[in-house]
Amino acid sequence: MTGAVEITPYQAGYRADVLHIAADSAFFGEPVEAFLEDRRLFCDASIGYYADFEAEYLWLALEDTRLVGYLAGCVDTPAQRRRYLTRSIAPLIGRVLLGRYRLGEKTWRTARSMFAGLLRSELAHVNYDEYPAHLHVNVAVDSRGKGIGKRLIETYLRQLRELQVPGVFLGTTNLNKAACRLYEKIGFTLLDAKITSIWNSFVDGDVENRSYVLRLMNP
Ligand SMILES: CC(C)(COP(=O)(O)OP(=O)(O)OC[C@H]1O[C@@H](n2cnc3c(N)ncnc32)[C@H](O)[C@@H]1OP(=O)(O)O)[C@@H](O)C(=O)NCCC(=O)NCCS
């Protein structure tokens, strides 16, 4: 049965469903298994942080009681980066050393590529003073194209404006075509783009890392 979709604040009972949609969308909208053997590693290194430590900026799209999409955000990215390292990455490294994840050839290839990409500074630039908040948005594959992503972003932007946050950014790639169209339609502008080689062994052709920004208050 399908019903109306409601956008609601995060409820902890949906944590596993949020992680599920995140992992199912991680590879340019496709499942994470394209580049990692163990989706728990991906979730612990990404969306798990937002569910556990930034829950006030996590929004859910519920169709009846089924989770069909989410938006994860935060209002202070520099502080979030520090918390993320201590609260998510440090324990994650411990679990890797204890052998808690399945680490196969794909995972090591991804880790090598990401490390090399970091050394080459392939991330698109953002000025956090102007754009301190950020967001990640994903919709379940069978619910895409129905206006849910747009409603999630509009809800979060209202929250940011109420909090008087001056600006918001997000990172994506040229391969996330629907996402780029959606951001541009909402009013985000492309701030920076950098070719990255980290996906070279997983997709044909170059991938472009992109940062999109939106000013929320007049300077
Ligand atoms: C990107 C995503 C969150 C958009 O959510 P959505 O609910 O599917 O998008 P909406 O239905 O709200 O679409 C809003 C606008 O986005 C654009 N859009 C959405 N789907 C599109 C598609 N398949 N192709 C082109 N444009 C698309 C359109 O401009 C659309 O407006 P319109 O229908 O009035 O023309 C969703 O498609 C998704 O999860 N994709 C895979 C994961 C991903 O790329 N996440 C973002 C990572 S940065």
Image: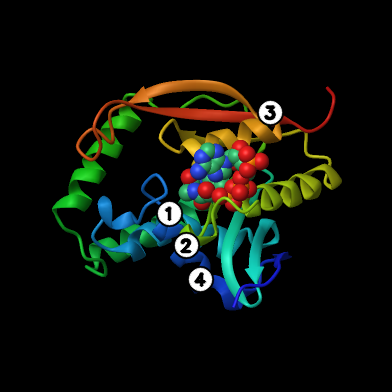
Can you identify the residue that label 1 sits on? 25
Q: CA distance from mark 4 to mark 2?
A: 6 Å
Residue 196 at x, y = what percent?
33, 27
Identify the mark at residue 5; answer none if there is no mark.
none
Can you identify the residue that label 2 sits on? 21
In primary-sequence order, the first of circles 3 and 1 is 1
Look at label 3 and name its amino acid: Asp
Where is the C terminus found, in terms of image quarters?
top right
Can you identify the residue that label 4 sits on? 17
Mark 4 in CB contact with mark 2 (< 8 angstroms)? yes
In primary-sequence order, the first of circles 4 and 1 is 4
Q: CA distance from mark 4 to mark 3?
A: 33 Å
Query: What kind of element bears circle 2?
Result: helix
Where is the N terminus found, in terms of image quarters?
bottom right
Q: CA distance from mark 3 to mark 2?
A: 31 Å
Identify the mark at residue 129; answer none if there is no mark.
3
